[in-house]
Amino acid sequence: IQAQIAAAQQTLAQEKQTGTELSTAHGQAIERQRLRRQFDAVQESIQRQRDDNGYWRSVISCVDGDLYGPHKPQNPANSNDVPRVTCSNSHRTVGEELNCSKAVESGEFTWKIQGMSWLRHALEGLQDEESVAAQSGNFCVGGEEFTLRYWPDWPEHGGRDTARPGTLYLFKESPGGITFRYKLFIKDKQGVFRQWGDEGNVCDMREDSMETPFGPDVGEHPTGVFGLTHDQLLNSEWVDCDTLTVRAELHVRVGTNLYDDEVPIMKPAIVVPEPSLGPNLLKMLDSGSCSDVTFFVEDEPIKAHAVILSARSEVFEALLVGSMKESLSKEVVISDCSSFAFRALLRFLYSDDFSAVEDLLRAHKANTAASTGSTDDPRGAGARTSDEHVQLLQSILTVSHKYQVCRL
């Protein structure tokens, strides 16, 4: 028996070492993921800057061609006439430059539909309205207002309905004619935006063109996003964490006369980066950098930061800053919850975002599936996985009550 105990202790030591190595590898994986998103953001910034540079090259060309500017030549006697060149019998070489893109303004808009699997139910209460499509807020490019709309039941339901002309489309909200080009992109699970359909090229100068739809499958028989029905889309690479992310890129020609010298200069929009406080704090938690307190949960050391925990929970504040012995030793033994539930609690406290907890749940589920492998009774395995998932959520709820984290 002593030999068995010694062998078991050796196995335990090996498992602890493996756990430490896996914890380090997890932190490295998180860092690689962060770098990939940083690279994606830089790539998007490069593309936006290229668009802005192209616009300013066009502006400079207009100034150099004396089409407009503070020191342009005086207008001819009849400014409404197209400039003409008269030639005598002698040979003369003449010419001029006509810039048709001098009044084009570019912009983009990103729309996220979260909870895609609930969308049909969320829209049921709108059945008496003129349209029951999901709709984004208004956005403006070149003085024209647009919205994005998504209709989940195309193409499952047949028939022509002017209020539901396509699956996913731009909707022009402003009156009057318009000339513009557009592209629609869908984000895949790798975080890359892929273009859906061809570039749209529109010149509609009707005064009643307000509330006109534009999109890759607008028409008599909408085909769905990438040819998928709504149900197929939910299980595709285009819906990540039950979220569909769409980006619209537009180039709108401002309604000026082609031969008008007075072309307003459009300043590029200021791009505000996404909030980064939560991801930065999670990085500190995962790496353990600058930590000053260690929790021991199921014999697993978990490093954290007393100032953050004290600010987020009065229980932690009393434990780590008050007169209790843990405030001096900075080592706390937790014996009434699992290490998984405690890690989930910390990730929520650091990010204030439940998606950080969901990411941990998904990673745990994937690791469990990988370690379990195949089974002769897949339905039984699915039931056990579901039961374990419920137990994990219950353990997170319990620990959130203990530390009075009401939002979690």
Image: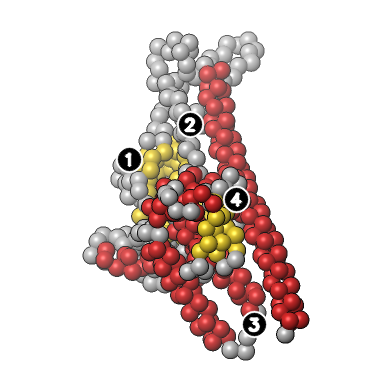
Disc on the earlier residue, 4 or 3? 4
In the displayed structure image, the side of residue 127 where residue 392 appears, left or right: right
Between circles 4 and 3, the one closer to the viewer is 4
Label 2 sits on residue: 268
Instruction: Give the residue displayed 68% in from the left and 66% down from the top.
Output: 16
Which circle marks residue 176 in the picture?
Answer: 1
Q: Position of residue 22 (x, y in %)?
A: 67, 62
Cβ–Cβ under 8 Å for marks 1 and 4 = no
Residue highlighted by disc 4: 288
| Three-letter residue code for mark 3 | Ser
Q: Can residue 135 be seen in this view?
A: yes
| Crowd around label 2: few <14 · some 14–19 · many ≥20 (10 Å) | some
Badge 3 density bin: few <14, some 14–19, many ≥20, Cα 10 Å = few
Q: Closer to the N terminus: mark 2 or mark 3?
A: 2
Q: Which one is in front in this view, the residue at disc 2 or the one at disc 1? A: 2
Which residue is the site of mark 3? Answer: 374
The residue under label 2 is which amino acid type? Pro
Kindly indicate whether the residue at mark 1 contacts the one at mark 2 (C-beta within 8 angstroms).
Answer: no
- The quarter in which the N terminus is drawn is bottom right
- For the residues marked 2 and 1, what is the alpha-carbon distance in whole angstroms? 24 Å
Point 52% across, 25% down: residue: 59
User: How far apart are the alpha carbons under marks 2 and 3?
Assistant: 55 Å
Cβ–Cβ under 8 Å for marks 4 and 2: no
The residue positioned 63% from the left and 13% from the top of the image is 92
Q: Residues within 10 Å of mark 1 (few under 14, many from 20)?
A: some
Q: Which of 295 and 101 is in front in this view?
A: 295
- Badge 4 element: loop
In the rendered image of this protein, does residue 115 appear above or below residue 292? Answer: below
